[in-house]
Amino acid sequence: MSDLAALRTAILEGKRKDAEALTKAALDQGTDPGTIARDALIPAMQEVGDRFSRGEYFVPEMLIAAKAMKMAMEVLRPTLAKSGYTPAGRVIIGTVRGDLHDIGKNLVKMMLEGAGFEVVDLGVDVSPEKFVEGVKQHKPQLVAMSALLTTTMLSMPDTIKALSAAGLRGTVKVVIGGAATTEAFAKEIAADGYGSDAATAVALAKRLVTA
Ligand code: B1M
């Protein structure tokens, strides 16, 4: 098995130390960092998402794989920028105002990173004003909001309105998710999409960024 195939397998199986060591070894052997990302890390996370969608992986397997991916990315990140590697797009993500649940949001973030996106994480309890500031500062293609509470999901339309008031709504696609939300709610508040889980969120982000 080539080193990159072994690296893919290490991520799929959530073997963090192997993922880190194999990434270092590939770099030491002179493999281009973009090739490591494109041929090993991103396909591994794509496969994780596919297995989740087919019901072969569940949240724990996805979390473990995402953590292995994170270890590999930490080794790779300093060299990626220098190698001229272009991310799939930039996303800002946050759990909305009043809401402290971040497990799902973190999983979505890790899966997006695994798909090659640059993700700016605004954290939890993110007000509409903070989302607006985040868009001004980081100029993302996509804003992703998460809400787990039926009370806090109401901050989502407020954020969309705040983006419009700041003249930024046309510059970004807005996607939402989290257990409190639904596809119908996304339509009602004129979001650009709804992700029922992390794998769907990645597919949605890819579709909207290339649209
Ligand atoms: Co809270 N909590 N909680 N909680 N909590 C829920 C959400 C609840 C359903 C439990 C219940 O009553 N059955 C309920 C909400 C009821 C409602 O509003 N309808 C609830 C409540 C009431 C509360 C408190 C108010 C309790 C209290 O203090 N009285 C309080 C609120 C605090 C606050 O936020 N202000 C509270 C607190 C907490 C803890 C701190 C103890 C803890 C959070 C820890 C943390 O996140 N760091 C917690 C937890 C763990 C839960 C449950 C048990 C699990 C949530 C979770 O992590 N799920 C939850 C009950 C449940 O869901 N079974 C519950 C796993 C996670 C992977 O799934 O977040 O849905 P999820 O993310 C998924 C998808 O939704 C999607 O992808 C993820 C991966 O597949 N997704 C996105 C998520 N974000 C996305 C964004 C996208 C796309 C997809 O953008 C495009």
Image (spheres, helix red, strand yellow):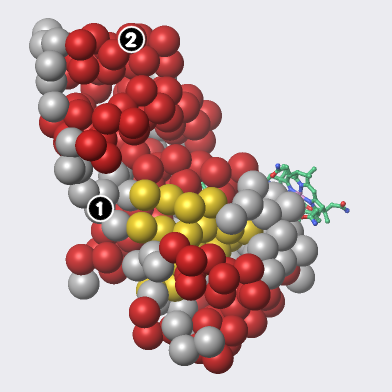
Above or below: residue 26 compared with residue 89: above
The secondary element bearing badge 2 is classed as: helix
- Ligand 1 near label 2 (Cβ, under 8 Å)? no
At x 26% / y 49%, what residue is drawn?
A: 87
The label on residue 21 is 2
Q: In which quarter of the image is the C terminus?
A: bottom left
Which image quadrant is residue 13 in?
top left
How much space separates mark 1 and mark 2, taking CA atoms? 25 Å
Residue 174 place in picture, x, y as percent: 44, 72
Residue 44 place in picture, x, y as percent: 26, 30
Above or below: residue 33 compared with residue 175: above
The label on residue 51 is none
Q: Which amino acid is tagged 2?
A: Ala
The label on residue 88 is 1
Crowding near pointer 2: few (<14 within 10 Å), some, many (20+)?
some
Above or below: residue 45 compared with residue 16: below
Residue 122 place in picture, x, y as percent: 59, 55
Q: In this view, does 125 lie to the left or right of 197?
A: right
Residue 16 place in picture, x, y as percent: 42, 16
Q: Which amino acid is tagged 1?
A: Ala
Query: Does the residue at mark 1 contact the one at mark 2 (Cβ under 8 Å)?
Result: no
At x 25% / y 53%, what residue is drawn?
A: 88
Of pointers 1 and 2, the one earlier in the residue sequence: 2
Whether residue 124 is visible here, answered yes or no, is yes
Q: Quadrant of the N terminus?
A: top left
Above or below: residue 65 compared with residue 2: below
At x 63% / y 52%, what residue is drawn?
A: 123
